[in-house]
Amino acid sequence: MKRTADERGLSTFLGLLEQGTPRWAVLEALFDSAEYRRLRNECTPLDVLHALRCQLVRQLPAAEVIVDLGGAAGSSIEGALLLMGYPHAPREITIIDLPPDSRMFADGFACIHQETTEWLVFGPTRVRYLHQSMSDLSGIADASVDLVWSGESIEHITQAEAGEMFQEVWRVLKPGGYFCLDTPNRAITQIQSPSQLIHPEHKLEYTASQLTRCLSEARFQIVQAGGLGPMPKTAQSGVFNWPELTESADLSDHAEICYLLYVKCRKPDLPALPASRRDSALPCPSME
């Protein structure tokens, strides 16, 4: 890789060896990594998107208590957030994901049978799994969480479920806590796939304005809105150009032309709502 090993990467690959993974398989994983492929100029657009998402994860706010919506990882029981390089040392992460038998590609999750509600300890961080919908955060106390992260997961639920999820996220966040998410940008994926969404598990893909409007209507304060993987040629021409992602791999303030959207928002310091309002879900606005 032409660099010294980072602590997280070293821990991950040594962990694989300790679990009995053959050395050739560990080397193959290194050779197949986006970082190594970039060194050899072999990056695909998907490699670029993954690298950008890892870059984004490294910019997430520091937090002691985290809820990761849809955060199970295919290759690590630590979960996606730590695997992708979250640079801080949270005290605990609760991963919300579907039960194994409800995941379309469950065979791709090598550690799926190790997922447990018991705390698993990785250095200074303990991790647990709750197998339930991301619109149901029961089991997590009110105002107890510093950061809720939804990494490419909101597109997997319906508009009504998103409204319920926003209410639940608001409930569990401490005042001043952050809600951060990324998701495909329908303004671009509509060009890529005009007749259907880009993944069979997707229920709804948002444009930049739709997503920020939903979050604002749910009372979140938008701190930052941008995107990953700008595709200005595709946006202007209306012709999808997949290799364009490898030409301008970067984070961008121009969300509307990016393949992925990113929003960082905050629960402001507000007085408690009356019970009549607190107990009624705030629907996501119409997508029309």
Image (tube, helix red, strand yellow):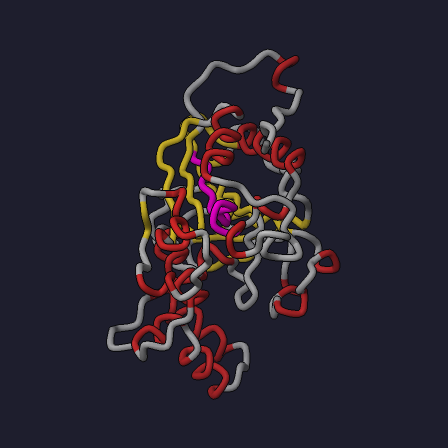
Residue 149's x, y, as percent? 48, 44
Instruction: From the viewer's side, name the closer residue of 41 and 144.
Output: 41
Would you place residue 283 above or below residue 78 in this image?
A: above
Residue 139's x, y, as percent? 64, 38
Does 180 appear in magenta? yes
**From where the camera sits, is residue 204 visible?**
yes
Would you place residue 92 above or below residue 104 in this image?
A: above
Q: How many marks?
A: 0
Residue 185's x, y, as percent? 48, 47
Residue at 71 percent across and 54 percent down: it is 99
Stretch of the chain drawn in magenta: 178-189
Left or right: where does residue 8 sit relative to residue 215? Answer: left
Would you place residue 245 above or below residue 185 in this image?
A: below
Instruction: From the viewer's side, name the closer residue of 4 and 70.
Output: 70
Instruction: From the viewer's side, name the closer residue of 69 and 236.
Output: 236
Does 36 appear in magenta? no
Residue at 61 percent across and 31 percent down: it is 163
Residue at the extreme bottom = 24
Residue at 46 percent across and 27 percent down: it is 220
Would you place residue 272 above or below residue 108 in this image?
A: above
Residue at the extreme front = 237
Instruction: From the viewer's side, name the closer residue of 253 and 32.
Output: 253
Residue at 45 percent across and 61 percent down: it is 83
**From where the camera sits, is residue 230 visible?**
no
